[in-house]
Image (cartoon, rainbow, N blue to C red):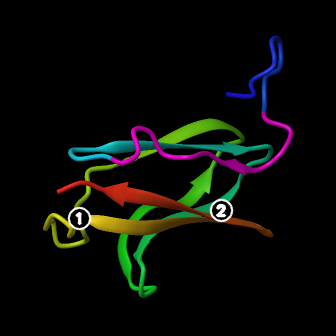
């Protein structure tokens, strides 16, 4: 990542690309918070329907990760294809694509 040596906290909000991508069984998403804030990270299908919430609530400043096992809110595997994940933290928001393998 962009973690400079000796630095304790991120200097800006950031949402990383998930790894691995594409993925089959699970993937990890890194994000960075310069201050304690309310965070929501959600996964959407290409039609804009939310399929899973990965994070919601107050998070401390720092370098964080959340993981997704490719399942929706009811525990079912999602269909293979392209999905979007979005992070909203205060005034910051960012969206990235991920791909789920068959």
State the SS at label 2: strand
Res 11 quadrant in image: top right
Magenta run includes residue 39: no
Sequence-wise first label, 1 or 2: 2
Residue under pointer 2: 38
Residue under pointer 1: 80
Res 61 quadrant in image: top right
Q: Residue at x 56, y 46 (%)?
A: 17
- Which residue occupies the foreground of this view, 99 or 73? 99
- Region rendered in magenta: 10-22
Q: Disc 1 or disc 2, which is closer to the eye?
A: 1
The answer to whether residue 42 shows anywhere in this view is no
Q: Is residue 6 left or right of residue 32?
A: right
Magenta run includes residue 15: yes
Q: Residue at x 21, y 44 (%)?
A: 25
Q: Quadrant of the C terminus?
A: bottom left
Q: Quadrant of the N terminus?
A: top right
Res 100 quadrant in image: bottom left
Real-space Cα separation, disc 1 to disc 2, in angstroms = 30 Å
Instruction: Pick out the residue farthest to the left.
Output: 76
State the SS at label 1: loop
Q: Are marks 1 and 2 in contact (CB under 8 Å)?
A: no
């Amino acid at each position: 990542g962009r973690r400079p040596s000796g630095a304790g906290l991120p200097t800006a909000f950031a949402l990383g690309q998930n790894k691995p991508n594409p993925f089959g069984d699970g993937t990890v998403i890194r994000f960075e918070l310069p201050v304690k804030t309310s965070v929501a990270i959600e996964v959407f299908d290409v039609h804009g329907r939310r399929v899973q919430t990965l994070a919601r609530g107050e998070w401390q400043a720092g370098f964080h990760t959340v993981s997704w096992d490719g399942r929706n809110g009811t525990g079912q595997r999602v269909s293979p294809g392209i999905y979007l994940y979005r992070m909203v933290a205060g005034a910051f928001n960012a969206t990235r694509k991920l791909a789920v393998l068959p």
